[in-house]
Amino acid sequence: MNATRKLFGTDGVRGVANIYPMTAEVALQLGRALAYVIKTSPGKDRIVVGKDTRLSGYLLEYAITAGICSMGVDVLLLGPLPTPGIAFITSSMRADAAVVISASHNPYQDNGIKFFSGDGFKLPDEIEAHIEKLMTDPDVDEARPTATEIGQAFRIDDARGRYVSFLKSTFPKNLELDGLRIVVDCAHGATYKVAPEVLSELGAEIIPIGVRPNGKNINLKCGSTHPEVMAKLVTRHRADLGIAFDGDGDRVIMVDHQGQIVDGDHILAICAQDLHRRSKLRRKTVVGTVMSNLGLEVALKDLGCRLVRTSVGDRYVVEAMLQGGYNLGGEQSGHLLFLDHTTTGDGVISALQLLSVMIREEKPLADLARVMTTFPQILINLRVKERRDLMSVPGARQALQTAEKRLGDRGRLLVRYSGTEPLLRIMVEGDNTQEIEHVAQDLAQTLEKQLS
């Protein structure tokens, strides 16, 4: 079914704003097709629409709203709110679906559109493929209502307050954050009001940065993709830790009091150990991806647990979690899933779960992070014009085989195309930093020549 999806990648439709496919015209068509899919009765259905803080959010928000209303479906407008907050509001208000307008960790010039079902989970691949097909289906045009049957748009003014209350409810009632000093980097994105409110109301002293969005500074040298900014402030202010979110708030990266980065794999290891000790890690299993560091797998094995790997993309992590009955999973990037609390990656919830471990164990983050030792890992991104099958390119195929032979059983190689950007990602992992650097650079140079 993936082959039939041309617009949708691993996380919705992405691109440069106001250039195909991120245009008002496409947004209108997507809204119309989504509304056509969810419309189940003569009565009015409802679709939630939310966004991050990008300048182009207005353009796409109004266009997709017009498309939805043109099919006789009402729109509930949330304005800027983290992606997981939009999913939560959709479920709590019993809406039929949701639209999130965001390009997550990408720069402000980009934007994206992704869909959630009424239960707060992302739509499966086959429904996205169906929506694509309907965008040019004449039957959809003929189904447009008139007069009083046209949809309306309503703004939900208390959405942030509802979400903040929900977030606080996921933190253990017998614990508090009093005495903790935390640097909080909101990436000038969708968490810029939510995260400081939640952490402050739970008792922490916070030093907020990245909380002045202007439409053009989202993710700009800040947030989870640039945690070094936060790390410097943590040491300067002698804070206990730092927490950085990405533009739409579904990822989190942390640093300890020494400014050392604690990524998604480490957070998973820490929380897995805590849940396992309290007999709350379902089936003693954590779900990761092919990009999860080998150190996570080793750490879990030492705990008597296991790691299940999926393709890259939180939708595939969630799919495996639901199928296997697991409650903890995520990605090295900090896109983590605590299915006991939420239906999608939520940076604030992930941070709160780790903070609860710190308070419960009475240990600093640096001590907790020792549960896992990171294996050296080299990541190289090559920009490509088209996604050619590497196995059909003789020189590329031979280069991959040579790299794997050099690594042997002491390392791991993963080469894949990005699902959201025109990039070929090369990951080499092993126990010898110098060796994997040579393997990665040699492979990258060869592939760049073969694919140019």
Image: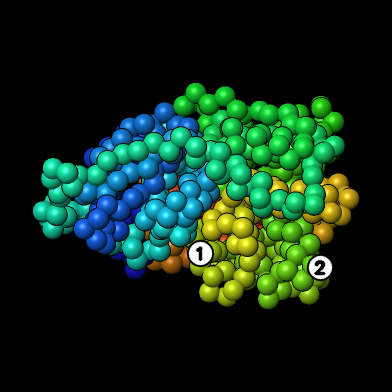
In the rendered image, which residue does mark 1 sit on?
316
The mark lying in front, picked from 1 and 2, is 2
Task: Name the residue located 18 percent from the left edge and 47 percent from the top edge.
Answer: 149
**Depth check, front residue: 138 or 3:** 138
In this rendering, the answer to whether 229 lies above or below 347 is above
Element assignment for label 1 = helix
**Depth check, front residue: 145 or 383:** 145
Hey, what amino acid is under mark 2? Arg
Where's residue 142, x and y in %?
Answer: 10, 53
Task: Name the residue located 37 percent from the left edge and 56 percent from the top edge.
Answer: 96
- Residue 204 position by quadrant: top right
Q: Is residue 387 left or right of residue 231?
A: left
Residue 16 visible: no
Q: Is residue 125 left or right of residue 36?
A: right
**Depth check, front residue: 98 or 308:** 98
Element assignment for label 2 = helix
Q: CA distance from mark 1 to mark 2?
A: 27 Å
- Residue 231 position by quadrant: top right
* Whether label 1 touches label 2, CB < 8 Å: no
Task: Name the residue located 77 percent from the left edge and 58 percent from the top edge.
Answer: 270
Where's residue 114, x and y in %?
Answer: 40, 50
Upstream in sequence: badge 1 or badge 2: 2
Hey, what amino acid is under mark 1? Tyr
Residue 39 visible: yes
For residue 191, the mark is: none
Quadrant holding the N terminus: bottom left
Task: Name the residue located 66 percent from the left edge and 50 percent from the top edge.
Answer: 169
Q: Crowdedness of circle 2 by 10 Å Cα count: few (<14), some, many (20+)?
A: few
Where's residue 241, x and y in %?
Answer: 78, 39
For residue 277, the mark is: 2
Where's residue 174, x and y in %?
Answer: 80, 52
